[in-house]
Image (cartoon, rainbow, N blue to C red):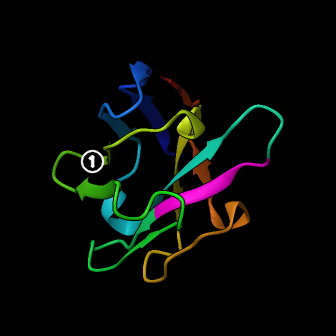
Amino acid sequence: QMQLVESGGGLVQAGDSLRLSCAASGRTISNYGLGWFRQARGKERECIATITGNGDRTYYADSVKGRFTISRDNAENTVYLQMNSLKPEDTAVYYCAASTRRFTLATSKWEYDYWGQGTQVTVSS
């Protein structure tokens, strides 16, 4: 089993930056593709960024492209999400997830095997 724990969420103003971290334990993340999802109140959980097992490819949803950056440190067993130029519409619970499909960019929540508990990000206008 793999455990994922997110941190770094909080309340910020529009235009600010936040860096989310997701620390893994129980398994080494180098064997997994990793993703960040978010779920706003009353909406479906959406994939916003993914990265392959060796970090050679990434995917970003159009809504965050150019503002968010996913990265991974396999030595630290941690995945990050750098979020810049935050907007009120970025307000959501953010989840990290791990997929055994490490060679592809998995964008569906059904492709992920392990999930963190989520961290709240609130962006005020």
Category of crowding for the residue at label 1, using alpha-carbon neighbours closer than 10 angstroms: few (below 14), some (14–19), many (at least 20): some
The tally of labels here is: 1
Q: Main secondary structure of the magenta part?
A: strand
Asked whether residue 93 is in view, the answer is: no
Instruction: Please say if 95 is above or below 28.
Output: above
Residue 87: % across, % down:
48, 38
**Residue most extreme to the front:** 125
Foreground of the two, 58 or 116: 58
**Residue most extreme to the left:** 75
Foreground of the two, 3 or 21: 21
Q: Is residue 75 magenta?
A: no
- Report the residue marked by disc 1: 77
Q: Which residues are magenta?
A: 44-49
Q: Secondary structure at mark 1?
A: loop
Instruction: Please say if 83 is above or below 29.
Output: above
- Horizontal side of 75 relative to 86 (left or right) equals left
- Determine the residue positioned at 59% across, 39% down: 89
User: At label 1, which amino acid type do we have?
Assistant: Asn
- Horizontal side of 77 relative to 40 (left or right) equals left
Q: Is residue 47 magenta?
A: yes
Foreground of the two, 39 or 106: 39
Residue 82: % across, % down:
29, 45
- Determine the residue positioned at 39% across, 50% down: 27
Instruction: Please say if 96 is above or below 51.
Output: above
- Horizontal side of 101 relative to 34 (left or right) equals right
- Determine the residue positioned at 43% across, 32% down: 6
Residue 65: % across, % down:
42, 64
